[in-house]
Image (tube, rainbow, N blue to C red):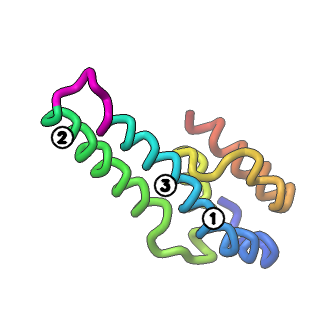
């Protein structure tokens, strides 16, 4: 977006990654549990539907969490925002400049 992020934004981002991942997976695991216990589906459909959902989530996790770098932080954050891993309230700890850049970029690409 606009070059190298501020050091404070980079430190904030790195410190949040574990929390963001665990919170996201907690939500997704609950959704998987709902699929696996849905009595409207056959056991076979429960299994395959959960498997398909896990494949989709694997791709999202790889996109968002693999290979963090300072120069790619903005792209990682945009992906996390788009997938719901990073939430609006999480942005409050970042510089106003970064928040504005991410918000503007998201609005342009919706």
Q: CA distance from mark 2 to mark 3?
A: 19 Å
Q: What residue is drawn where x is 13% and y is 36%?
A: 44
- Residue 13: x percent and y percent? 69, 69
Image side of residue 80 versus residue 56, left or right: right
Q: Quadrant of the N terminus?
A: bottom right
- Residue 35: x percent and y percent? 33, 35
- Tell me if mark 1 has few (under 14), some (14-19) or many (20+) residues whose alpha carbon lies within 10 angstroms of its own: few
Q: Which residues are magenta?
A: 36-42
Q: Residue 19 got which mark?
A: 1
Q: Secondary structure at mark 1?
A: helix
Q: What residue is drawn where x is 54% and y is 61%?
A: 21
Foreground residue, 109 or 66? 66
Q: Work out whether 4 lies above or below 61.
A: below
Q: Work out whether 64 lies above or below 101.
A: below
- Residue 30: x percent and y percent? 46, 44
Foreground residue, 42 or 3? 42
- Tell me if mark 3 has few (under 14), some (14-19) or many (20+) residues whose alpha carbon lies within 10 angstroms of its own: some
Residue at mark 2:
48
Image side of residue 73 versus residue 35, left or right: right
Q: Quadrant of the C terminus?
A: top right
Return the residue found at the far right. 96
Say which label, 1 or 3, has the lower sequence index. Answer: 1
Would you identify the image quadrant in which residue 41 lies?
top left
Q: What residue is drawn where x is 77% and y is 58%?
A: 98
Q: Secondary structure at mark 3?
A: helix
Residue at mark 3:
25
Q: What residue is drawn where x is 22% and y is 36%?
A: 46
Q: Secondary structure at mark 2?
A: helix
Return the residue found at the far left. 44
Q: CA distance from mark 1 to mark 3?
A: 10 Å
Image side of residue 94 versus residue 27, left or right: right
């Amino acid at each position: 977006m606009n070059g190298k992020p501020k050091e404070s934004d980079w430190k904030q981002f790195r410190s949040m990654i574990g929390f963001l991942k665990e919170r996201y997976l907690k939500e997704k695991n609950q959704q998987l549990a709902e699929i696996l216990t849905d009595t409207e589906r056959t056991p076979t459909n429960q299994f395959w539907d959960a498997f398909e959902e896990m494949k989709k989530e694997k791709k999202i996790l790889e996109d968002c969490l693999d290979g963090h770098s300072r120069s790619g932080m903005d792209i990682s954050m945009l992906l996390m925002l788009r997938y719901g891993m990073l939430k609006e309230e999480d942005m409050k700890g970042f510089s106003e400049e970064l928040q504005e850049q991410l918000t503007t970029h998201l609005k342009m690409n919706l």
